[in-house]
Image (cartoon, rainbow, N blue to C red):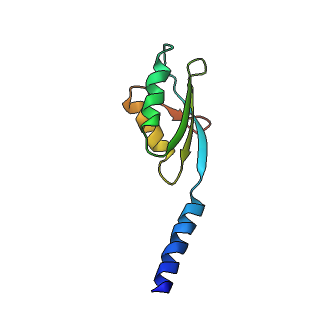
Amino acid sequence: MRKIIASIALALVSSAALAAVQTITLSVPGMDCPVCPITVKKALEKVDGVKKANVEFKSREAKVTYDDAITTPDKLMKATTDAGYPSTLKGAAK
């Protein structure tokens, strides 16, 4: 029984150690008014695992900090797209 508990504890610690908080920048070119970032930010903040979202109208970018064990850049881009603002990962090859 102790070996089972120890194995479970080790597995939990190992998976937690692999998880990391990441920060990415999304390009959101469809934002055409100063109110658009509010919609984009709310959409991103609804995604499980998002810790923080800063959305800038001037640069048309969203900087998102998230837990990579819970969500992915693809899910973040889907959230902005579903809100009416398609985005791409800044710096990613097209």
**Location of residue 81 by image quarter:** top left
Q: Relative to the observer, which residue lies in front, 5 or 62?
A: 5
**Location of residue 89 by image quarter:** top right
Q: Position of residue 67 (x, y in %)?
A: 54, 49
In the depicted structure, whether residue 86 falls above or below residue 70: above
Q: Position of residue 23 (x, y in %)?
A: 61, 41
On the rendered image, what quadrant is the N terminus found in? bottom left
In the depicted structure, whether residue 39 falls above or below residue 92: above
Q: Relative to the observer, which residue lies in front, 86 or 52?
A: 52
Q: Position of residue 55 (x, y in %)?
A: 55, 26
In the depicted structure, whether residue 51 falls above or below residue 13: above
On the rendered image, what quadrant is the C terminus found in? top right
Q: Residue at x 46, y 35 (%)?
A: 45
In the depicted structure, whether residue 34 falls above or below residue 94: above
Say whether residue 30 is visible. no
Q: Residue at x 48, y 79 (%)?
A: 5
Q: Is residue 71 left or right of residue 62?
A: left
Q: Relative to the observer, which residue lies in front, 27 or 7?
A: 7
Q: Residue at x 60, y 62 (%)?
A: 17
Q: Relative to the observer, which residue lies in front, 78 or 63?
A: 63
Q: Position of residue 7 (x, y in %)?
A: 51, 79
